Image (cartoon, coloured by chain):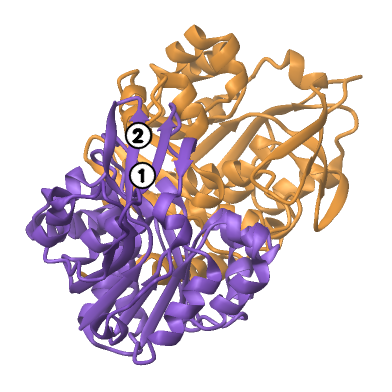
Chain colours: A orange, B purple
Amino acid sequence: MSLTVVGSIAFDSVRTPFGERDRMLGGSAVHFALAASFFTDVGVVGPVGDDFGEAELEVLRGRGVETRDIERVNGGKTFFWRGHYEHDLNVAHTDDTQLNVFGDFEPKLSQASREADVVFLGNIQPELQRGVRAQCEAARLVALDSMNLWIETAKDSLAAAIGEIDCLLLNDAELRMLTGEANLARAARAAMELGPRIVVAKRGEYGAALFTGAGFFAIPGYLLEDVRDPTGAGDSFAGGFLGYLDSLGDPDPPLAELRRAMVYGSTMASFNVEDFGTERVRRLERPEIDARLGEFKALTHFEE
Amino acid sequence: MSLTVVGSIAFDSVRTPFGERDRMLGGSAVHFALAASFFTDVGVVGPVGDDFGEAELEVLRGRGVETRDIERVNGGKTFFWRGHYEHDLNVAHTDDTQLNVFGDFEPKLSQASREADVVFLGNIQPELQRGVRAQCEAARLVALDSMNLWIETAKDSLAAAIGEIDCLLLNDAELRMLTGEANLARAARAAMELGPRIVVAKRGEYGAALFTGAGFFAIPGYLLEDVRDPTGAGDSFAGGFLGYLDSLGDPDPPLAELRRAMVYGSTMASFNVEDFGTERVRRLERPEIDARLGEFKALTHFEE
């Protein structure tokens, strides 16, 4: 089993009511890979600049993440995001975005990355996602994330990309925007008509919902008293979700496994937000994940 | 077992993207009572005007609801609300509010209403809620709903009212506003410190969360493809939740029963929104409720 993620590698400067950090390691591919690394072998494809050093690579390698396809662009600078959160941690306020080497990113996959069983196309330009997808012929499950920018500026390309994948992960607001359907269940059905057999709506603190032809599943967010920084929670969700699915080795996992994958995803997201950036996931131990899965069950289960 | 609800009885004129209705039966006490009537004996305390006729009373009586304490104010007009919903059904836009007889409401409880086992203090002025609560000495469970208006204009009275009850039901935004805590779990804990041993956060389409000293529980909203009118969903939730709890006859229901009550509440809310006003609940049959409880289990359960 192996998993390839293509996406951003970043330095994030983040301020929340609970503290701030300057130029900490971030980016969708990083948050995804660290979460997925608890379940399977994962390799990252993405660009960095001269300012990205061994210390950052070591964070990934320390979790067993394959960094062979992290492309260092000489003379370039790593993608940088500065943002803050007010009282309402559901809303990120962007103060500065410097695409740097990410603006000219053309994914280059090694043979090993192309042969992955599961591929996650993180939020990049849809035509680039299509190019990666075309290279990964052997993948039994290809998932895609996107954002409002591409829905607004490259909708046809995005629809084509979605038509070529198995699993779509979007925020619920983006799913509504993409399909023009205000009702989430209808929006998910409309998205499935574009191609994917699995649609996941990420709902922030409210959890996530899964839609397949075989049925629905929904899970509330884990109720934490201490949330310090929500940056990367959606990517950690995707990493737990797809990492667990890859670990099964099943090309068409049954609904029961997809449900379990949703809970692993939510579990990884819940750890992500407990501290800034990757700090909590870096010191996470596998038994904590299994314990929280049990707590999720205690949180959500009832008897008829 | 018996349940008394004190609250508004209204005529609602509502427009949504799926149709509109003029002067249909509504109000918090009505939605609550119809939902609770599937589980226990419920009596309504609230004021109406000359414009409230036998047809409206018959809707309640047809479900076995006791209408003895519905007070007809001669020469008065019934509370009237006009509102609409856009694409986003989570947001109600108020176009007109005429308090009419509800503006001078002073709850008058018959002996039978005062002897109820469970009492629901619907969203009215907090001092009126306190007056009702003081009359219901025998109640083993008193629950209270409120709104942003009272948090803004009568916070001390509201805090005193909350200090005298067992169970607080609020929207999550209101719970945050009441306590000044942005984090929902912290807000619930702060609310419990005011007095109640049970706090329920209503989260609209995202479901609801329960907080007690014994543990948390959260349930997502039922994923419906057809939502026509969300008016009254929160009161239907409260009716299902407290109606089920009253039916148990247990003064201190264990967490397992509180969880089940949450699912009954969510089930009743999910039926409420399937049609305008009380239309869906009026034609609802008990087996449909039990079937949906099973569907809720299929929606939310997973195995570790």
Name the residue type under label 1: Thr
Q: Are marks 1 and 2 in contact (CB under 8 Å)?
A: yes
The reply, left or right, for residue A138 in relation to residue A90 is: left
Residue A137 image offset from top left, x and y in percent: 42, 20
* Residue with the mark numbered 2: B14
Q: Chain of mark 2?
A: B
* Residue at 44% over, 81% down: B133
B219 vs A92: above or below: below
B263 vs B4: above or below: above
First of labels 1, 2 by sequence position = 2
Residue A108 image offset from top left, x and y in percent: 64, 19
A276 vs A171: above or below: below
Label 2: how many Cα within 10 Å (few below 14, some 14–19, many 20+): many
* Residue with the mark numbered 1: B231
Label 1: how many Cα within 10 Å (few below 14, some 14–19, many 20+): many
Query: Please, what secondary structure does the residue beneath circle 2 have?
Result: strand
- Residue A171 seen in render: no
How far apart are the two marked residues, 1 and 2, measured between alpha carbons? 8 Å
